[in-house]
Image: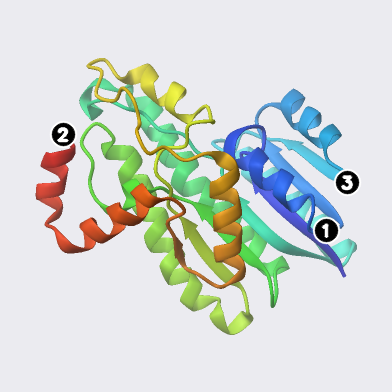
Amino acid sequence: MKQIAVITGASSGLGAGYARFLDDEGLYELWLVARRKERLEKLAESLKTPCKCLPLDLISRSALDNLQGILKEECLAEDTRITYLVNAAGFGCIGLSRECPRERLQQMVDLNCRAALAVTEMCIPYMGKGSHVLQIASCSAFQPIPNLAVYAASKAFLLSYSRALSVELNDLGISVTAVCPFWIKDTEFVTKARETDKHGAYFDMPGAANVKKVVEKSMAAAKSGTVVCTPDPVSSIHRVLASLLPHRLLARMCK
């Protein structure tokens, strides 16, 4: 049985961080999925595990269909099992929803929700006992957040989906972990998200984590069967507060 990992959003940030971590897991192959072909190939060259680079824009339905076709053809023909699925593709927009381009908000939901759902469901048939699904959510999933309204809602979907899926897949021996970090300082996420921040809603991010620690802690959590992982102090505190205080109050505090 050939064991592989499928990693979306692998061209940078957390996706690339998971690829580097899984490079030491003794897998047969890493499947790296992202839009930017050159970055995928550069990452692949730096890893010792053989890589399959799949330059696909998962916002596109045709790209999802292509990925499903590749999975069906190669996993069935080669007796391949997906040991790790990491859904790290995603982006955010900072700013009032009414001031953000509608197309961009819709693309965010398409990538953060629909694509993550599609990739997960198409990979499950090729997973088995001991396989792990990691959904990269956010601590924003714990409550509504003004100026991150659609992003937080998209991550709340992913968190709820992960919790339910962990129960559905338990009898198959497949674990599901929703990874809910605070801001991560060494990724492109904040830079891209701030492109729509007309009012300077977010400046500095005290307590921000880094890719290496988030990856290490979340992988340990996945292997132990943890369903919701808060890999840094801020996200852990946020989770507790969101479980105790009214969400309307928290939303006003965030604003």
Tag 2 or tag 3, which sits nearer the N-term?
A: 3
Q: Residue 143: where, in percent of width, then height?
A: 24, 51
Residue type for callout 3: Pro
Work out whether residue 247 or residue 207 is closer to the camera in this orientation and state it. 207
> Is residue 68 at least partly visible in the picture?
no
Category of crowding for the residue at label 2, using alpha-carbon neighbours closer than 10 angstroms: few (below 14), some (14–19), many (at least 20): few
Neighbour tally class for label 1: few under 14, some 14-19, many 20 plus, Cα within 10 Å: some
Residue 161, position as x, y percentages in the image: 42, 62
Left or right: residue 91 compared with residue 203: right
Quarter placement of the N terminus: bottom right
Is 171 located above or below residue 219 in the figure? below
| Residue denoted by label 3 | 50
Residue depicted at x 72% and y 64%: 83
Residue at image coords 37%, 46%:
154
Residue under pointer 2 = 255
Residue occupying the point 70% across, 69% down: 127
**Image: 130 above or below 112:** below
Q: 175 left or right of 67?
A: left
Give the residue pinned by disc 1: 27
Q: Is residue 60 above or below residue 138?
A: above
State the separation of the CA atoms marked 1 and 2: 45 Å
**Marks 3/2: CA–CA distance:** 46 Å
